[in-house]
Image (cartoon, rainbow, N blue to C red):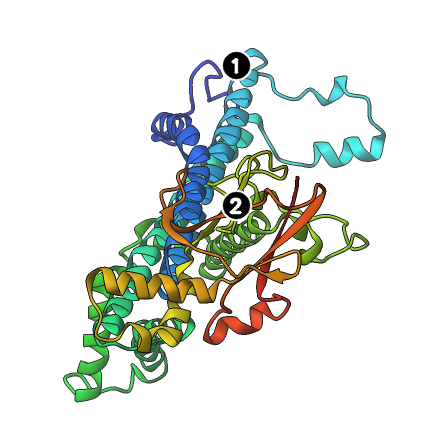
Amino acid sequence: MSDAIEDPRRLSRRTTPTWEVELLISGVAVFAMLQLPGWLDDRMFALAPRLGDEWLSVLRLSYFYAKSAAVVLATTFALHLLLRAQWIALVGTHSVYPEGIRLDRLKMGPIQRALEEARPDSTPDAIERADNRASIVFAIGVSVASIIAAVCIGFCGAMLAATLAAQAMGWRVDPLVTMSVVFGLFMAPFALASWLDHRYGARLAPGGRGRRLVEALLRFYMRIGMGRRNNRVVAILSSNGGERRMMAVIVGVMLVAIVGVVVADLLARDGARFGNYSGFPDADALAIHPAHYDDQRDPTRDPALPYVQSAVITGPYLRLVVPYRPNRDEAAMRTACTARTAGLAGDALAAARLACLQDLHPVMLDGKPLQNLHYDIASDPRTDRPALLAMIDVRDLPRGRHALRIGHPPRAGRQQHKDAADPGYDTISFWL
């Protein structure tokens, strides 16, 4: 439709009818979506120290999927607002200057002018493309976020059920094995049925056992949301814009979002991974970590490490708090404390467990074992997580720098190789 037919003072009849709703949703939801990733980070850092490896794997998987969906939605709404603003600018400019681009008033050489004049492009066409582009970006972003959310609910729910079943039966299962088995049991039948349909579907006799089996499998997966029509937006975009191209876009967006969230999580847990610090000494045993001092640590983000009240001790006692870390302490207690706690109950059981934990967390002061170390059952007042508390008398120590060395049990099973550089203790330096 040409410029002469379209009234520049009115929106084109070809304008996407949902543009107002799209703008409303993006404008309202973009602020909530921008805050949601940070809220998920806070919940993740608060829950992670409370869980053992099995439950931590379920939590991390849920966190990665949920944050990926939130990041996709936040990016979609922000990008959609930008594209809609570009569209609005084109519509407004066209209403002010309905004659469009006047090439005769632009300075350019004859070759460039000939190329520009040869392009059959009008302002209404550019407006329509900008309108369609914004709607497609909105549709793709919302669809990708919906797919990630559905995978999070389905796959993480299956992981949760498998972990509960394993614990109910008393099995000790590696989280990676559980994840692989759940994924295989969930996806293998669908992949097999789809392959058989593509390869032999035309040959299978109607009503035959093979065809009925393939139909039953595909019908089951369609009912749980894996049919082409279940995500109608993706089906429409794929069938009209090219299936391979659209699937490449959707899978690419999902991978970028998930990988970005995983990398951000690694950087949040270890900021030294990012930056040109290759020449800086890398020795945890010699480093001063803010997480080891109560007046410097961030309880919502720092790992659950032993800590004292401050780097400079002004009172007669050093207050040492050793947080209970289920992913290490619980596994070690099953190995080292089972015989000591057999047949005990009540206060006797609690005392035996406390004695076992004390053996698992020995303390050395300036290279010498603390013979009179005594732990009490306490909690971290700022996170309300269980912890051991030891009050160490430092009145007889000389002024200057001193070092505490708090032992901890190694990780069990598959996690051992990740701690190859772990010396087996935490070092806290303090000054009197």
Residue shown at 52% from the left, 31% from the top: 83
Is residue 305 or residue 322 the one in the foreground? Answer: 322
Residue shown at 36% from the left, 61% from the top: 354
Residue type at the position of mark 1: Ser
Is residue 242 or residue 231 the one in the foreground? Answer: 231
Is residue 142 or residue 415 the one in the foreground? Answer: 415
Contact (CB < 8 A) between labels 1 and 2? no
Is residue 244 or residue 223 the one in the foreground? Answer: 223
Instruction: Using the image, determine if residue 17 lies above or below residue 414.
Output: above
Residue extending furthest toward the front = 396
Instruction: Using the image, determine if residue 30 lies above or below residue 199.
Output: above
Neighbor class of circle 1 (other Cα within 10 Å; few <14, some 14-19, many 20+) is some
Neighbor class of circle 2 (other Cα within 10 Å; few <14, some 14-19, many 20+) is some
Residue shown at 55% from the left, 31% from the top: 126
Horizontal and vertical percent for residue 245? Answer: 50, 57
Residue type at the position of mark 2: Asp
Badge 1 is on which residue? Answer: 95
Badge 2 is on which residue? Answer: 302
Horizontal and vertical percent for residue 427? Answer: 62, 55
Residue extending furthest toward the right = 109
Residue shown at 55% from the left, 23% from the top: 90
Horizontal and vertical percent for residue 155? Answer: 32, 63
Q: How many marks?
A: 2
Element class at badge 2:
loop
Quarter of the image with the C terminus in it: top right
